[in-house]
Amino acid sequence: MTNETIPTLLLNNGTSIPQLGFGTFQIPPEDTRDLVLTAFETGYRHIDTAQMYRNERGVGDAFAASGLGRDEVFITSKLNNAFHAHDDALTAFDQSLQELQVDHVDLFLIHWPLPAVGKFAEAWGALEEIYRSGRARAIGVSNFQPHHLRRLFEETTVVPAVNQIEVHPWLGNEEVRAFDAEHGILTEAWSPLGRGAVLEDPTIVRIAGEHDKTPAQVVLRWHLERGDIIFPKSVTPARIAENFDLFDFELTEADLSDITALDRGERIGSHPDEMNNTGR
């Protein structure tokens, strides 16, 4: 299987993004290079990292060792919470480019809105400058609620290309997804497997058995068919391959409905209005 199998979506500025990628959340810096190389060898061409993860250098090392061209890999990183002030955001972005060892990223996001700090619109102004400079092919946000996005619409110019939010079968986050879609913003689902918690749900286990697939593959396929961009993470080569093997089956309408009906509004991460950690 090659990366040509991976479907792509168009961002609101015309940039193409692979719908399936490889996530690096909680991958130790010392392991990142080898695991990202494994992902490249499997066929992944979309890598999601962040300043907060402290593993951008490993992503950059893997890309440098991969032999792939810059236009063959879609790289996303995110602004750390301590750097929402305009000049701090610009400096932090420059540091990301140095760590990744590239002259541009494909997508750069504000990681959390931090509403109690109240500077996310100022940070977005810095991202707009980065976007206009060509050093980010697209810019977006992560963990933004509709009221955070409305403030950006009122105070800034560029509509975010994506909103990366917590989405999995136990948290459909449908209100935010619908708001995103209404405004031409694609939704990226972080923790698409609910950190593994949803994989023992009887409905998902049943559907997996009917398709001769694993519960993880069924959940990831559910995301793809509803239009989410996903980047599952694993530190196990076999799981990295399993999470990529999603394109030889389709879920039925009944399957999709049954999985969507599992939504219980259950978060595994912080609520965006309550996350105010400005530390690094």
Image (cartoon, rainbow, N blue to C red):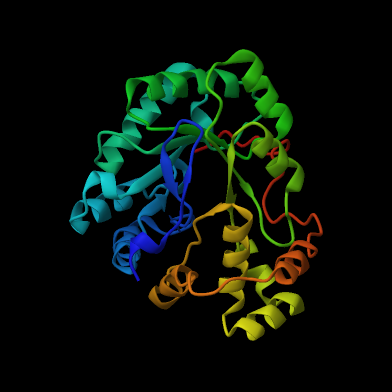
The quadrant of the picture occupied by the N terminus is: bottom left
Q: Is residue 34 left or right of residue 235?
A: left
Is residue 210 placed above or below 30 in the rendered structure? below
Q: Quadrant of residue 116?
A: top right
Whether residue 23 is visible here, answered yes or no, is no
Q: Is residue 153 left or right of residue 42?
A: right
Is residue 79 placed above or below 222 in the rendered structure? above
Q: Quadrant of residue 171?
A: bottom right
Q: Quadrant of residue 24?
A: bottom left
Q: What's the residue at 56%, 72% (across, down)? A: 217
Is residue 8 placed above or below 35 in the rendered structure? above
Q: What's the residue at 78%, 60% (across, down)? A: 263
Whether residue 28 is visible here, answered yes or no, is yes
Q: Residue furthest top?
A: 155
Work out whether residue 136 or residue 31 is closer to the camera in this orientation and state it: 136
Q: What's the residue at 32%, 51% (across, down)? A: 59
User: x and y percent of residue 150 in the render?
Assistant: 69, 24
User: x and y percent of residue 192 in the render?
Assistant: 60, 59
Work out whether residue 258 or residue 35 is closer to the camera in this orientation and state it: 258
Q: What's the residue at 56%, 25% (across, down)? A: 159
User: x and y percent of residue 273 in the render?
Assistant: 73, 35
Total number of numbered labels? Answer: 0
User: x and y percent of residue 246 in the render?
Assistant: 50, 70
